[in-house]
Amino acid sequence: MDPAWLLLLLPLAVASGWVGARRRFSSPRGNARPVSGKPYLETLNLVINDQHDKALDVLSTALQEHDQDLEIQLALGSLFRRRGEIERATQIHQRLLARPAQSLEQKSQVLFELANDYFKAGLLDRAENLLKEASTSSVVRESAFRLLIQIYESEKEWANAIEAVLALASLSGEDLSHSTAQYHCELADRAIAEGDLDSAERSVSEALRYRPRFARATILQGRLRAAGGHHAKAIGIWTDLLNASPEFAHEVVKLVKHSAESLGEAHRYSAFLQRAIETSGDDRIRLLYSDFLAREGREEEAERYLWNWVTESSSLVGLHQLLEIKSEQNREPSNRDEYRLFRQVTAKLLQHRIGYECRFCGFQGRSMHWQCPGCRHWDTTGPRASALLTQEL
């Protein structure tokens, strides 16, 4: 809801809440000094005149003097937080927390809102502690776990994230196996970096238990086989990946090349490239295959492959690579310059297409991210275009 509309509704809520309180209570607390309508009329006029900041100040002052209604105070604090006024929101929620004789549900609501304030302010440890306390109440338990998961992801506390996501899945009934598998893969990546292959193996097994044939876990499984010297098994795992998830062919192609070189069997790399081209149609793999042919001394075959590719599909990527070969082969300076000029044109046309892009928020980067750095969604990043060009671009 737009803050201006909330400002309009708050005075009405205050007035209706006060009237209800007057009818319900005849105790000394019910005989509290009536709330004057003047501040709320002033608030209304200020909102109508687009003076939202002044309206909030007037309304906040009035509510401090007559702060019996918890819901209105929480709404006001939330509004301040949405406007980026974290300190004011925090003050409201801390004042509410200090109130005596609150029920467990009321206290949990305030703790949750204060945790949100701390989260927005970057005070993640404080937010985490408050959320753990708030999660004891069923009123905010599910929301508390959702925010805890965000905190654990931000701090890369993957073991805690696993506990929280399993608790949330139990509460909400959602299938959160994908997130659980991702967290186990994060633990496996960390363990591999630290040289703890046994821990990595356990984490990968857990990821595959939650998500069988999970692409990321399969890639890691191949890495572990290669790390143990079982390069043929590793290549077999990555080749099987092409059947279930061909879109990840380029993410393992360097790993396959390294294992094939370790075995001294270049044909394994060649076979993987050809299979990847069949299953994925990824132009980046086609470029690597033509490069493989050229490095093996099969320049004419590489050129013929590129020529057929460009002829059949009018591929700008293939043309770019073919022009490079032609410019290197041609000994006539004028012809060589022409090829280079054409290649500059194709490079310019392709430049805006390289790299990766999140299909959810549009974040763009040069490298693959399992979790988008922009929107924090998992598995939403993919290649912007099927092109793997040289660093000159």
Image: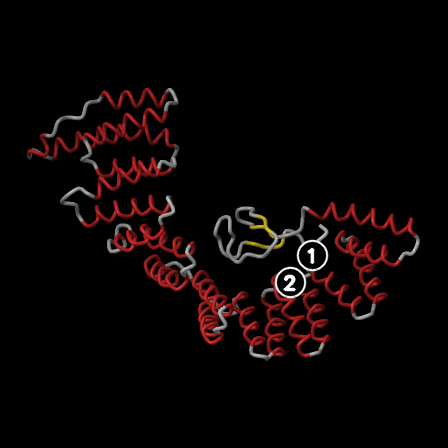
Query: Looking at the picture, which amino acid does disc 2 mark?
Result: His
Residue 218 disc label: none
**Along the line of sight, the residue nearer the viewer: 42 or 345:** 345
Quadrant in the picture for the N terminus: top left
Query: Looking at the picture, which amino acid does disc 1 mark?
Result: Leu
Could you tell whether 38 is left or right of 100 in the image? right
Cβ atoms under marks 1 and 2 closer than 8 Å: yes
In percent of width and height, residue 44 lies at: 31, 22
Measured along the vertical axis of the image, is residue 215 above or below residue 226?
above
Q: Residue furthest front?
A: 194
First in sequence, mark 1 or 2: give its number: 2
Location of mark 1 (residue): 388
Tell me if mark 2 has few (under 14), some (14-19) or many (20+) residues whose alpha carbon lies within 10 angstroms of its own.
many
Q: Which residue is depicted at the point 81% across and 55% down? A: 324
Which of the 4 quarters of the picture holds residue 55? top left
Which of the 4 quarters of the picture holds residue 162? bottom left
Q: Residue furthest left?
A: 27
Measured along the vertical axis of the image, is residue 232 above or below residue 150?
below
In percent of width and height, residue 134 lies at: 26, 52
Q: CA distance from mark 1 to mark 2?
A: 10 Å
Which of the 4 quarters of the picture holds residue 245? bottom right
Location of mark 2 (residue): 250
In percent of width and height, residue 203 lies at: 45, 70
Badge 1 element: loop
Measured along the vertical axis of the image, is residue 166 above or below residue 119?
below
In percent of width and height, residue 327 lies at: 85, 54
Badge 2 element: helix
Q: Which residue is depicted at the point 77% across and 48% down? A: 346
Numbered disc total = 2
Tell me if mark 1 has few (under 14), some (14-19) or many (20+) residues whose alpha carbon lies within 10 angstroms of its own.
many
Q: Which residue is depicted at the point 23% across and 31% down? A: 63
Name the colouring of the figure.
Answer: secondary structure
